[in-house]
Image (spheres, rainbow, N blue to C red):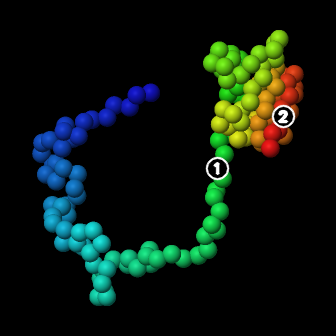
Amino acid sequence: MVVYRQKKRVRYRGKGSGTHGGGARKKRRGAGSRGGRGNAGTGKRAGHHKFWGSLGSRGFIPRRSSGKTDVINVGDLTAERLTHWVSEGKATKEGNTYIVDLTSLGYGKLLSTGNFAVKAKITIAQCSPAAAEKVKAAGGEVVQSS
């Protein structure tokens, strides 16, 4: 359902909108009303921004990469997509079996979200057990490469 929303120029027009959404008339003044500009007010006197807690580094950060892997779901491997990859030369088809190397396509893990109804031999580095079960149920197989 589309929600009708009035434009700003209409909302801020007319009587009763003297501050255009700014609250009281005193609030939209200079930088003094917000305690200065930028990081002003980080000195020693009271009444300033409590700023120093966010400076510096704290804690232990391991120096290893997060190692994010691109994932693909079995529901994304439709017959149309596999046929498209065959036409582009990214996959092959032998009889009624598609042969796809998802590692060469940039994917690292096969997950099980969605339905899978195509007979395919899929090569990938990692695969969840539920995804492998869905591929086997459709008559295919998953080959895990290292």
Tags 2 and 1 in contact by the CB under 8 Å rule?
no
SS state under label 1: loop
Asked if 37 appears above or below 141 in the picture, the reply is below
Per the image, the residue denoted by label 2 is 143
Most distant residue in the top direction = 95
**Mark 2 vs mark 1: which is more N-terminal?**
1
Q: Residue at x 25, y 36 (%)?
A: 7
Give the quadrant of residue 86: top right
In the rendered image, is residue 115 in sight? Answer: no
Q: How many marks?
A: 2
Give the quadrant of residue 58: bottom right
Mark 1, other Cα within 10 Å: few <14 / some 14–19 / many ≥20? few
User: At which x and y percent is residue 112?
Assistant: 76, 35
Specify whether 112 is left or right of 23. Answer: right
The kind of residue on which mark 1 rests is Lys
From the image, which quarter does the C terminus lie in?
top right
Viewer-side residue, 145 vs 18: 145
Q: Residue at x 64, y 49 (%)?
A: 68
Asked if 88 appears above or below 2 in the picture, the reply is above
Specify whether 40 is left or right of 98. Answer: left
Picture disc at residue 68: 1
The kind of residue on which mark 2 rests is Val
Give the quadrant of residue 81: top right
Specify whether 115 is left or right of 141. Answer: left
